[in-house]
Image (spheres, rainbow, N blue to C red):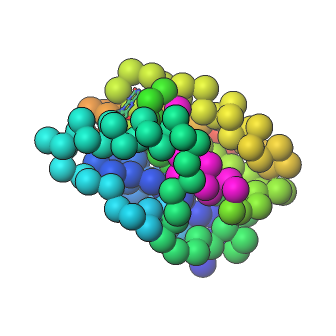
């Protein structure tokens, strides 16, 4: 078992692709932040997903995570997610509500279509005040789909992880 863990939430697969590249580069363990109620990953149903995501955001919902994540067993935890409505999906709040990241190192990353990290890395610093949060990496969706190994490698080097 590695002392590093990559946690990711992904519906269309792009945050998963970045997560898998981080695993290839670092040898970290990986675990999906899997929703108890799956989201529709058919991209032609985007409007329905957008509507549901907006409702979850506006009603400050906490979608349940399907299983227990091995947070306690790891020291360095990557947390990856797509931008949804200019912030992270509400299931990331569920993650911070349910797990204690005190004393751990968090390394955020996200996929997006123009919003960058949308201020979510600053939000993570607020949600986990007793963790060390390193500089994250926003990856544009198309880049993530093409595979963005070089940028991921550069980033991991810049934060001293490889
Ligand atoms: C419901 C929803 C809301 C989104 N909102 C934003 C947004 O506010 N800003 C942005 O840059 N991209 C937004 N996107 C685009 C996603 O961040 C992008 O498609 C991402 O690569 C999806 O990650 P995934 O493949 O891991 O699910 C949104 C996508 C969805 C489905």
Report which quarter residue 28 is drawn in: bottom right
Percent across and percent down for residue 161 are 63, 49
At a point 74% along the width and 43% down the height, the residue shown is 127
55 relative to 10, above or below: above
Q: Ligand 1 shows up in which quadrant of the image? A: top left
Horizontally, residue 5 falls left or right of residue 130, namely left
Report which quarter residue 160 is drawn in: top right
160 relative to 77, above or below: above
Residue 154 visible in the shown view: no
At a point 68% along the width and 53% down the height, the residue shown is 96
Percent across and percent down for residue 120 are 60, 33
Horizontally, residue 109 falls left or right of residue 4, namely left
Horizontally, residue 44 falls left or right of residue 39, namely left
Majority secondary structure of the magenta segment?
A: helix
The residue segment tinted magenta is 87-97
At a point 36% along the width and 43% down the height, the residue shown is 52
118 relative to 102, above or below: above
Residue most extreme to the bottom: 1
Q: Is residue 89 magenta?
A: yes
- Dividing the image into 4 quarters, which one contains the N terminus? bottom right
């Amino acid at each position: 078992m590695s002392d590093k863990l990559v946690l990711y939430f992904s519906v269309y697969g792009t945050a998963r692709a970045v997560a898998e590249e981080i695993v290839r580069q670092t040898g970290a363990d990986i675990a999906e932040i899997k929703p108890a109620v799956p989201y529709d990953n058919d991209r032609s149903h985007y409007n329905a997903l957008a509507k549901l995501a907006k409702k979850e955001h506006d009603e400050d919902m906490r979608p349940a995570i399907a299983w227990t994540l091995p947070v306690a067993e790891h020291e360095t935890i990557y947390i990856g997610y797509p931008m949804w409505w200019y912030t992270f999906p509400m299931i990331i709040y569920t993650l911070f509500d349910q797990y204690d990241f005190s004393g751990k190192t968090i390394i955020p990353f996200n996929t997006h279509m123009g919003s960058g990290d949308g201020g979510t890395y600053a939000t993570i610093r607020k949600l986990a005040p007793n963790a060390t949060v390193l500089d994250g990496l926003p990856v544009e969706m198309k880049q993530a789909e093409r595979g963005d190994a070089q940028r991921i490698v550069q980033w991991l080097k810049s934060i001293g992880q490889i």
